[in-house]
Image: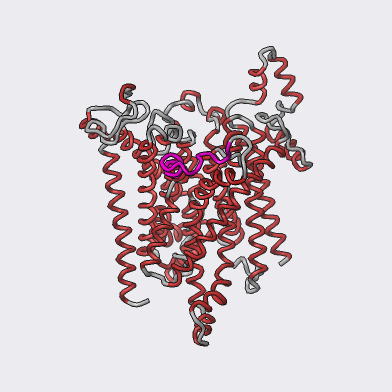
């Protein structure tokens, strides 16, 4: 177990390191240049001034040297400032991350509390009409473009019915009810993106467990189907589902980006999008890395949980 | 499972795949007949008519007109061309990359397999959309591409094909590797090895043909995802640039116009949805028909 933990930790750390390098290089390839942006902000700056600023910030050094400098500073907790918000990037990102985690947490809750019963229903009568109907709905959920789903929800609930607001955060100081109302459409949108996949996993996993010998034993003892599913099959089949959900965290962030963009929700996704388009290189870089870290941490924790929950899994024989 | 439900299953599965296939053929026909619509409706894709903004459904404009008075039907047909071209081309590129990686990993085994598959898993786990947005924002001139090419109006198409290919290969790689592991142990492959056939020849002559079904299945399944990614990027203004229509960028303004022109927001999205779900059903049916064992359930 210790060996497994260590190797997973090394893998996670190397992916983060590699991502930091790739992102650093990519952001260097984005249009514009921080010093040019400074010059355009202040026309009195001359070419000599620009050269001097470049020297002060080490921008005249070769790219790999600049990356090394950045990495050393980052490892010491120095992530610098955001150009758009004129605040330390960590503060800007921390605020946005909280918003995103609320949105993702609620969406995950909705998604799981619908996907597990739906998957159960489908797996109980596999290849029945119920199963096929659920499967069709899952495919629809997987195939719908999330931004269009958001548009259609806005069209139905905000434009035609007028029940819910089209933006996530109401203007001004408002009560809890108004805030909650604003969150309904974003949460539905984000939940819909993942619900189809999760339902299919639950169904497949439960179907697998139902084929096992101990299930037949449980039935032969005279237990009802309900008891068998509740006490025997469901527990075992939820273990892979937990892993799958954690592997989906990355895709969930992608969905959150679209959702936040559509509903004007001030989370990580919208922040990253604005940072990339607004040439806020540092914010985009650190934001991308933060999203990557959160995703990889979730995967890492799920691996540990998987190993802890299921004693049959031995990571010694992993490389077969 | 009794005979009756198996019958229903096969019927439904394959019927869904067949229906999807027919829908895709119709969609391709629809996009190909774009010039025909132009001729019949006596209009042009980019013919702006500011007196006919947000036109209702009519004989001249069967689906109405957009915010610049352009015919929606004609633009839908041309936009579909772009979405399908990106979908097919990027899917083929992804399939090539994925096959190369899956084949190498599965045949070589050992640390290389470990490394390649760990990389694949990492790419799958990454939050791809933020990364794609950064990739789409890259300034091509800084990559050393001459300015007249880097800022050409059609470059968006090539750029987006490359970008989505870079992330679309993971499904193919996994499925191919799994199949190679089985094929490698087949008696005829082992016989070839025993006869002293060289590794490259074994891969190309004995293993690659056996991979046709998993590659077809995985590629079909990836087309839907690729079209989704293209539409998202174009919608965000980072993919296909206007005035060239794509189903994604036709929705860019739809949000602000949703009060005045809800139909503008409706039709392009329906087209994306129909295309993606058809590819997914077709891939699912093909998986049942061609590679039932690879189904991990």
Image side of residue B127 versus residue B149, left or right? right
Identify the residue at the far right of this view: A76
Q: Residue at x 52, y 87 (%)?
A: A221
Q: Nearer the viewer, residue A181 or A317?
A: A181
Residue B74 picture location, percent across and down: 29, 34
Q: Is residue A158 magenta?
A: yes
User: What's drawn in magenta, residue-wise?
Assistant: A151-170
The residue that appears at 30% across and 45% down in the rendered structure is: B27
Tag count: 0
Q: Indicate left or right for A249 with A208 as reference.
A: right
Reply above or below: A86 against B217.
above
In the picture as drawn, the residue positioned furthest to the bottom comes out as A221
Q: Quadrant of residue A40?
A: top right
Q: Indicate left or right for A6 with B208 as reference.
A: right
Residue found 28% across the figure and 27% down from its top: B44
Quadrant location, the N terminus of chain B: bottom left
Where residue A240 sits in the image (x, y, percent)? 57, 65
Q: Nearer the viewer, residue A66 or A164?
A: A164
């Amino acid at each position: 177990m210790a060996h497994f933990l260590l190797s997973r930790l090394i893998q996670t750390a190397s992916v983060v390191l590699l991502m930091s390098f790739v992102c650093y290089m990519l952001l260097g390839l984005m249009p514009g240049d921080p010093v040019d942006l400074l010059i355009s902000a202040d026309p009195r700056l001359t070419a000599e001034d620009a050269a001097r600023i470049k020297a002060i910030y080490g921008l005249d050094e070769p790219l790999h040297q600049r990356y090394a400098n950045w990495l050393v500073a980052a490892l010491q907790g120095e992530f610098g400032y955001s150009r758009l918000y004129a605040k330390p990037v960590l503060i800007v990102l921390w605020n946005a991350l909280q918003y995103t985690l609320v949105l993702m947490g609620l969406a995950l809750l909705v998604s799981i509390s619908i996907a597990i019963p739906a998957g159960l229903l489908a797996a109980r009568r596999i290849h029945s009409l119920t199963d096929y109907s659920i499967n069709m709905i899952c495919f629809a959920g997987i195939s719908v473009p999330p931004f269009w789903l958001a548009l259609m929800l806005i069209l139905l609930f905000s434009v035609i019915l007028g029940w819910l607001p089209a933006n996530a955060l109401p203007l001004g100081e408002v009560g809890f009810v108004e805030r909650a109302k604003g969150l309904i459409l974003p949460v539905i949108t984000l939940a819909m993106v993942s619900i189809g996949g999760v339902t299919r996993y639950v169904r497949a996993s439960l179907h697998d467990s139902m084929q096992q010998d101990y299930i037949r034993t449980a039935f032969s003892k005279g237990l009802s189907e309900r008891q068998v599913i509740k006490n025997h099959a469901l527990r075992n089949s939820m273990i892979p589902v937990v892993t799958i959900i954690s592997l989906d965290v990355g895709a969930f962030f992608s969905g959150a980006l679209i959702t936040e963009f559509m509903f004007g929700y001030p989370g990580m996704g919208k922040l990253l999008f604005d940072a990339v388009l607004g040439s806020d290189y540092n914010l985009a870089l650190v934001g991308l890395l933060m999203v990557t870290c959160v995703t990889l941490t979730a995967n890492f924790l799920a691996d540990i949980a998987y190993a802890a929950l299921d004693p049959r899994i031995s990571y010694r024989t992993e490389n077969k | 499972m009794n005979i009756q439900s198996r019958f229903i299953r096969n019927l439904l599965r394959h019927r869904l795949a067949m229906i999807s296939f027919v829908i895709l053929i119709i969609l391709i026909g629809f996009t190909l007949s774009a010039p025909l619509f132009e001729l019949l409706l006596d209009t042009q894709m980019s013919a702006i008519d500011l007196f006919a903004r947000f036109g209702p459904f009519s004989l001249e404009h069967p689906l109405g007109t957009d915010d610049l008075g352009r015919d929606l039907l004609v633009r839908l047909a041309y936009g579909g061309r772009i979405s399908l071209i990106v979908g097919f081309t990027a899917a083929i590129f992804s399939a090539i990359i994925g096959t190369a990686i899956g084949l190498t990993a599965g045949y070589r085994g050992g640390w290389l397999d470990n490394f390649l598959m760990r990389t694949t898993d990492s790419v799958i786990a990454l939050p791809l959309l933020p990364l794609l947005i950064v990739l789409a924002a890259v300034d091509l001139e800084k990559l050393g591409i001459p300015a007249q090419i880097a800022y050409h109006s059609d470059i968006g198409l090539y750029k987006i094909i490359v970008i989505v290919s870079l992330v679309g290969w993971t499904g193919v790689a996994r499925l191919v590797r799994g199949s190679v592991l089985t094929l490698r142990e087949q008696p005829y492959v082992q016989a070839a090895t025993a006869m002293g056939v060289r590794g490259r020849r074994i891969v190309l002559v004995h293993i690659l043909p056996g991979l046709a079904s998993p590659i077809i299945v995985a590629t079909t399944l990836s087309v839907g995802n690729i079209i989704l990614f293209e539409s998202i990027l174009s919608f965000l203004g980072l993919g296909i640039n206007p005035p060239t229509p794509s189903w994604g960028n036709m929705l860019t303004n739809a949000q602000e116009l949703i009060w005045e022109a809800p139909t503008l927001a409706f039709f392009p999205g329906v087209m994306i949805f129909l295309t993606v779900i058809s590819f997914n059903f077709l891939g699912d049916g093909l998986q049942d028909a061609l590679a039932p064992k690879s189904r991990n359930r």
